[in-house]
Image (cartoon, coloured by chain):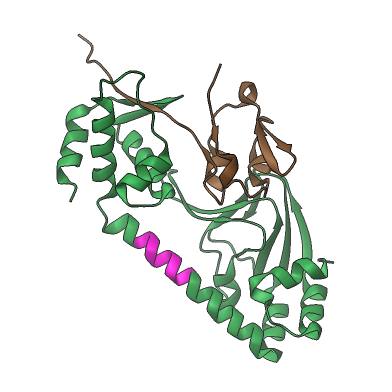
Amino acid sequence: MSEMPSFDVGKCDGCQLCISVCQRGGLRSAGESIEVVFADCDECGQCELVCPTGAISFPFEVVIEEPHD
Amino acid sequence: MIPAELAGSIPYFSGLPPDAIQALRQALFEKRVDRGEIVLLEGEPSGALFFVAEGVVKVFKTSPEGKEQILAIVRPGDAFNDVPVFDGGVNPASAQAMGPALLYGISRTNLMRIVAAQPQLAANVIRTLAQRLRDMVALVEDLSFKPVIGRVAKILLQYATDTSEPRPRLTQQDIAAMAGTAREVVGRSLKALEEDGIIRLEKHRVVITRRESLQQLAAEAV
């Protein structure tokens, strides 16, 4: 199961702009906060881009590609 | 007509007497746009200033190669397309709705008429344009002078060679905090590195495809 996006409830101000830009219904309103519906997220990153408080982020690991022979 | 409460909350209209707010409300036209809809096209005349009431609009420029540079993310209460309304020129950038959005626009003619009669509105316009100038100067600084890409390269290399388990994870915000810059700048840096073929952005991970090039950039970082 995807772990993305990471959502910091403490930073969320409930503006719901992330919901308005999500094309996949990956985010839902949950009272004064937001619920992330992981299975529907395609990680387009638009929610992270519009979030005014930095409550949404997409954690990633960094790897080095092994050269092919 | 735009709700009075919403009109009063727009920075452009702050401190205006009720008759001026009323005149502006009557002059504003409503525009609903869907996700992805282009509101303004760069280089075309439009002659209208827009306010976002609901949703988000991105203001961007596109290079001849199709590369997009986002200039602003416009959220509720903020305005866009100020410059051509006041100088009479064409749109300096394009604007696109990032989701369903409700906008209110005012034509150059109507706005100038009300500005001429309301010194407070003129002062608000000057303050807003001054802020735009500050934002643009900050953007120029980020794009021109700061070796942000080098610092981002250095951080990526550090994490790629970290052998601890479980694998450490990063966010753009983490990198921004470490590099001493804004998350948007990190996003642009990662995109630029990908366009240069130095990294590949995948789901949940960044793959370094040209390690030597990344090391070279990291070495150039101040």
Residue name at image x 60 percent, y 80 percent: B124
Left-right relation of B64 to B31: left
Q: Which colour is chain B painted?
A: green
The stretch drawn in magenta includes residue B133: yes
Left-right relation of A3 to B120: left
Q: What is the quadrant of residue A35 in the picture?
A: top right
Quarter holding the N terminus of chain A is: top right
Q: What is the quadrant of residue B137 in the picture?
A: bottom left
The stretch drawn in magenta includes residue B97: no
The mark tally for this picture is 0
Residue B174, given in percent of the width and then of the height, sits at 39, 41
Front residue of this view, candidates B124 and B196: B124
Residue name at image x 27 percent, y 55 percent: B146
Quarter holding the C terminus of chain A is: top left
Above/below status of B41 relative to A20:
below
Q: Which colour is chain A painted?
A: brown
Left-right relation of B138 to A11: left
Residue B149, given in percent of the width and then of the height, sits at 28, 45
Q: Is residue A58 visible?
A: yes
- What secondary structure do most residues of the magenta stretch adopt? helix
Front residue of this view, candidates B161 and A19: B161
Residue B10, given in percent of the width and then of the height, sits at 68, 69
Residue name at image x 63 percent, y 42 percent: A18
Residue furthest top as drawn: A69
Front residue of this view, candidates B133 and B36: B133
Identify the magenta region. B132-140
Residue name at image x 39 percent, y 60 percent: B139
